């Protein structure tokens, strides 16, 4: 992108996501018996580390600012910011500088802007937001210095995004903003050059493999926040809570119809990560769009999540008669997408020898149900696909996350085509699984 030269910024500062079968043995690795600051308050809300909570009341300190030898004293009053009182202390004897409108225009056009800062300066960048949406302020530099970034209303009396300490190559998180004029406020604790850019979108988009922060602002603990994404591949979407507070997550269709039960994730810690209590996951299908929903306590102002996708090669077939073939000795990795119906696979028994069907559920939400069928080759039911029954009971089982089951197929079973039906045990179950015929 085009960059403003540091010298320009410095000058501006200076001036201004049915047939009986033989006995059969089902090994039970896991077989279920279940049936089939400034003195202002902000209202901004928004879209893979820490949650910023501001529960302690604080009063903005008065600061004495000396400009060109004349002492000017400004005192602000206690203020409630996004549901919790917040403090923003300007550096002692800080000099406030407002940059020209051209800098803001370039910033909102997606350009990277270099801002030369010193510890005694607070910079305001005037910007105009062209539409209602979600905005993120990003640092693109590699400086070791921490920057304090926020966004205020045009009169500088109301926080749209509360002040946040942002490291190099990080951002404020996405916050809700309406069309209009604002100021981006920048300050730091030491002399440094900050390279800033802005991302403005109509909705919050989920980026896989990276942390994504949302500035929740003033909100109700019953309110869900939605992030849209389109699956670039079929697989398993894993959502990890990287916040220091508990959150709830779920997945929906683009019209906000729930495709999964909401799951509560514990706050991020090494122990909780090891125990698998900070993540949840869902099956997704390539080319489909989804909404990931997130909810936090009302006292939480910012949350961070990390999302990754494990790709699987198949979703099977949606029709029994057109079931996807699995060859003996082969392994198929597949995903049952959230909100999807059953998937079908088939394999053939061609000799009087034993076979083993092994099914491993990978990470999933809820339980998957597996049932076995066969194609009749004689009699009045010739050509029909019927349930495989032993002792009058159909062969099948339900299977939770990360479990293995083996079905031993005796040598005296008919040499016919067999069908495997994989379906969600409940409407909201989804995830990945592996099938091997040996």
Image (cartoon, rainbow, N blue to C red):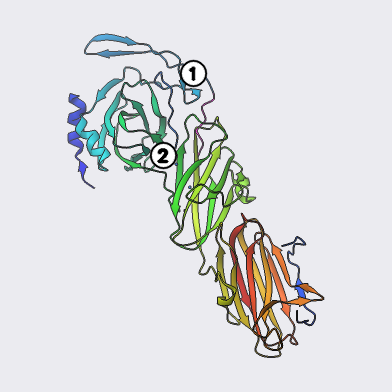
Q: Nearer the viewer, mark 1 or mark 2?
A: 2
Position of 276 relative to 407 (above/below): above
- Quadrant placement of the C terminus: bottom right
- The picture quadrant where one finds residue 167 is top left
Position of 208 relative to 119 (above/below): below
- The picture quadrant where one finds residue 378 is bottom right
Residue 376, image x, y percentages: 68, 84
Number of numbered discs: 2
Q: Which is more toward the observer, 327 or 338?
A: 338
Q: Which secondary structure class fits the magenta region best?
A: loop
Q: In this view, does 52 lie to the left or right of 277?
A: left
User: Badge 2 is on which residue?
Assistant: 174
Query: Magenta span covers which residues?
Result: 50-55
Residue 264, image x, y percentages: 62, 44
Query: Spatial distance from mark 1 to mark 2, Cα to Cα?
Result: 25 Å
How crowded pointer 2 is (Cα within 10 Å; few <14, some 14-19, many 20+) is rated as: many
User: Badge 1 is on which residue?
Assistant: 58
Residue 115, image x, y percentages: 26, 34
Q: Which is more toward the observer, 354 or 227?
A: 227
Badge 1 or badge 2: first in the primary sequence:
1
Position of 32 relative to 262 (above/below): below
Residue 385, image x, y percentages: 66, 78
């Amino acid at each position: 992108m085009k960059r403003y030269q540091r010298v320009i910024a410095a000058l501006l500062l200076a001036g201004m996501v049915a047939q009986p079968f033989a006995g059969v043995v089902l090994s039970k690795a896991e077989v279920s018996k279940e049936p089939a600051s400034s003195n202002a308050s902000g209202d901004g809300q928004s879209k893979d580390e820490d949650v910023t909570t501001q529960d302690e009341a604080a009063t903005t300190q008065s600061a004495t600012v000396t400009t060109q030898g004349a002492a000017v004293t400004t005192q602000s009053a206690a203020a409630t910011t996004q549901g919790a009182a917040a403090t923003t202390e300007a550096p002692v004897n800080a000099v406030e500088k407002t940059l020209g409108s051209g800098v803001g225009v370039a910033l909102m056009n997606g350009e990277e802007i270099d801002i030369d800062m010193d510890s005694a300066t607070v910079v305001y960048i005037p910007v105009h937001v062209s539409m209602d949406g979600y905005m993120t302020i990003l640092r693109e530099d590699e400086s070791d210095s921490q920057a304090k970034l926020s966004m205020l209303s045009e009169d500088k009396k109301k926080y749209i995004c509360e002040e946040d300490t942002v490291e190099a190559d990080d951002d404020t998180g996405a916050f809700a903003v309406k069309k209009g004029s604002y100021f981006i406020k920048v300050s730091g604790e030491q002399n440094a050059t900050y390279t800033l850019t802005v991302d403005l979108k109509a909705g919050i988009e989920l980026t896989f493999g990276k942390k994504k922060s949302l500035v929740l602002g003033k909100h109700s603990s019953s309110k869900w926040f939605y992030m849209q994404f389109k699956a670039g591949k079929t697989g398993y979407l894993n959502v990890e809570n990287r916040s220091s507070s508990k959150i709830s997550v779920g997945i929906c269709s683009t019209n906000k119809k729930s495709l999964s039960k909401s799951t509560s994730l514990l706050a991020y810690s090494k122990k909780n990560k090891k125990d698998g209590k900070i993540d949840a996951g869902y099956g997704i299908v390539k080319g489909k769009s989804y909404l990931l929903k997130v909810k936090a306590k009302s006292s939480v102002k910012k949350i961070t999540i990390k999302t990754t996708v494990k790709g699987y090669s198949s979703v099977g077939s949606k029709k029994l008669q057109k079931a996807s073939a699995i060859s003996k000795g082969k392994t198929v990795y597949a995903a049952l997408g959230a909100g999807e119906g059953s998937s079908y696979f088939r394999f053939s028994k061609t000799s009087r020898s034993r076979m083993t069907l092994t099914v491993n559920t990978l990470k999933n939400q809820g339980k998957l149900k597996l049932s076995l069928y066969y194609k009749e080759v004689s009699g009045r039911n010739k050509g029909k696909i019927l349930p495989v029954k032993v002792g009058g009971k159909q062969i099948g089982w339900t299977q939770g996350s990360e479990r293995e089951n083996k079905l031993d197929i005796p040598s005296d079973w008919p040499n016919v085509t067999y069908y495997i039906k994989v379906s969600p045990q409940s409407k909201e179950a989804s995830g990945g699984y592996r099938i091997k015929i040996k």
